[in-house]
Amino acid sequence: MKTNLILIALAALCGMISLSAQEADIALIVNKAIAVDKISSQDVRDIFTAKKRSWDDSTAVKIVIQSKNLPSFFEKFLGMSDSSFKKLWLKLTLEGKAKAPTDLTSDTEVLKYVAENAGAIGYVKAAALTDAVKRVAVTE
């Protein structure tokens, strides 16, 4: 009985580690028309916090997120929790300073949105990438 409980606990732990490893490999993606192959981590923060609202060619930035599917994005790329991100955007939208990001529920939906919307930026699991979008490298 004790051995079974230990095996169940180990299996659960392995599952959590596997999920964490999957979430760790998040790809930042943009619409293919955006003339950028790499982006600074500061620019990522500025875009996702509405401090930067257009690309260098003046195309409006359209943010798409997956708050329920990949909440680790906020910590990894923005240095904030998903709840802090949501509070920030609630404040910005209530004050009329910005339009809230589109929040989708799957990599497939995000890939489609980014591919079809000029100026779009989002993120997916790296394993889900397709050639319909462009992955951008994040630099310091």
Image (cartoon, rainbow, N blue to C red):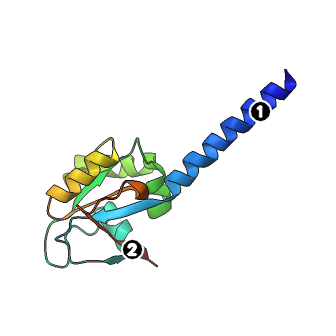
Q: Residue furthest right?
A: 2
Q: Position of residue 90 (x, y in %)?
A: 30, 46
Which residue is more in the foreground, 104 or 53?
104
Residue 62 visible here: yes
Which residue is more in the foreground, 99 or 5?
5
Snapshot quadrant of residue 14:
top right
Q: Residue at x 44, y 50 (%)?
A: 84
Q: Of circles 1 and 2, which is in front?
A: 1
Which residue is more in the foreground, 72 or 8?
8
Q: Helix, strand, or loop for circle 2?
A: strand
Looking at marks 1 and 2 on the same chain, the residue that comes earlier in the sequence is marked by 1
Q: Residue at x 57, y 50 (%)?
A: 20
Q: Residue furthest top?
A: 1
- Quarter of the image for the N terminus: give it: top right
Q: Is residue 76 above or below residue 103?
A: below
Q: Is residue 71 above or below residue 41?
A: above
Q: Position of residue 25 (x, y in %)?
A: 49, 59
Which residue is more in the foreground, 139 or 116?
116
Q: Which residue is mark 1?
A: 7
Q: Which residue is mark 2?
A: 137
Snapshot quadrant of residue 104:
top left
Cα gap from disc 1 to disc 2, whole angstroms: 40 Å
Q: Residue at x 38, y 66 (%)?
A: 45
Q: Position of residue 119 (x, y in %)?
A: 18, 65
Q: Is residue 64 left or right of residue 72?
A: left
Q: Helix, strand, or loop for circle 1?
A: helix
| Amino acid carrying mark 1 in the image | Leu
Q: Position of residue 83 (x, y in %)?
A: 44, 45
Residue 98 visible here: no
Structural crowding at the residue carrying mark 1, measured as other residues with C-alpha within 10 Å and reported as few (<14), some (14–19) or many (≥20): few
Q: Is residue 107 left or right of residue 116?
A: right
